[in-house]
Amino acid sequence: LKIVTNKLTGFIYEEHSKQDINLIEFLDVQRNKNIKLILEILTNKIKNDYLITEIVSLYKADKFLPKFLFNLENQNLFKRTKVLFINANSPNKQEEEKYIKPFVEKNKNCSYIMLDKDPGLYGVWNLGLNNSDTEFVCNSNVDDLRFNFGTELLIESLVDKDEILSYGDTYISSEPGV
């Protein structure tokens, strides 16, 4: 089993941590990397309309959804991503659906599943895996954000290699939705 990480791909929200970074400098360096080549490789290798399935578990997620959905829709590979929003019988489902239902209606690559009971996070991920038909699968947490090229970096580390798992190192922020 080979596990690889592929540079920094985004931010995660961790309430009790603080770290100073020069974000502008970091973004400039990342922006200058040649993502176009990766997209060409992926486009030519994958025949399915969707390259990757992104599983998004929803449970008490309403306060994070506006920034998360904006971030998700601005991913370079968003139109090639099949997004499964799975609501784990959240007590906040009505508030969450105010964001999710219009988003799913607007984006044909997204679907919404409402569960009658909460199977736990791993149960949601397993349901998402069972509903996936793409070559690549990932999970996304609504309190985390990715750089718009983060998915490409992760996929690139798996294409034509022996690795079976890739994860992105991230900056940790004490502020949600940095």
Image (cartoon, rainbow, N blue to C red):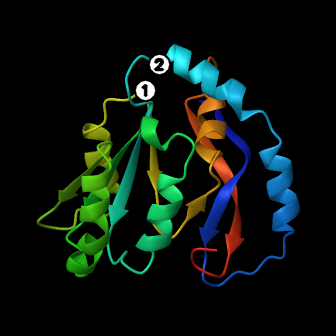
In the depicted structure, whether residue 156 falls above or below residue 56? above
Label 1 belongs to which residue?
Answer: 135
Q: Amino acid at mark 2?
A: Ile
Kindly identify the residue that appears in the image at 27 percent across and 63 percent down: 102
Q: Dot 2, crowdedness within 10 Å: few (<14), some or many (≥20)?
A: few
Give the image quarter of residue 6. top right
Q: Nearer the viewer, mark 1 or mark 2?
A: 2
Q: Nearer the viewer, residue 68 or 166?
A: 68
Kindly identify the residue that appears in the image at 37 percent across and 74 percent down: 61
Give the image quarter of residue 93. bottom left
The location of residue 1, given as percent across then percent down, is 59, 30
The residue most toward the left is 116
In the depicted structure, whether residue 70 falls above or below residue 91? above
Q: Mark 2 and mark 1 in contact (Cβ < 8 Å)?
A: yes
Kindly identify the residue that appears in the image at 62 percent across and 21 percent down: 40
Which corner quadrant holds the C terminus? bottom right
The location of residue 28, given as percent across then percent down, is 84, 53
Element carrying mark 2: loop
Q: Nearer the viewer, residue 33 or 159?
A: 33
Marks 1/2: CA distance? 8 Å
Mark 1 and mark 2 lie on one chain; the one further toward the N terminus is 2
Q: Dot 1, crowdedness within 10 Å: few (<14), some or many (≥20)?
A: few
Label 2 belongs to which residue?
Answer: 46
Q: Amino acid at mark 1?
A: Glu
Q: Nearer the viewer, residue 125 or 178?
A: 178
The location of residue 46, given as percent across then percent down, is 47, 19
The residue most toward the front is 106
The location of residue 36, given as percent across then percent down, is 69, 29
Element carrying mark 1: loop
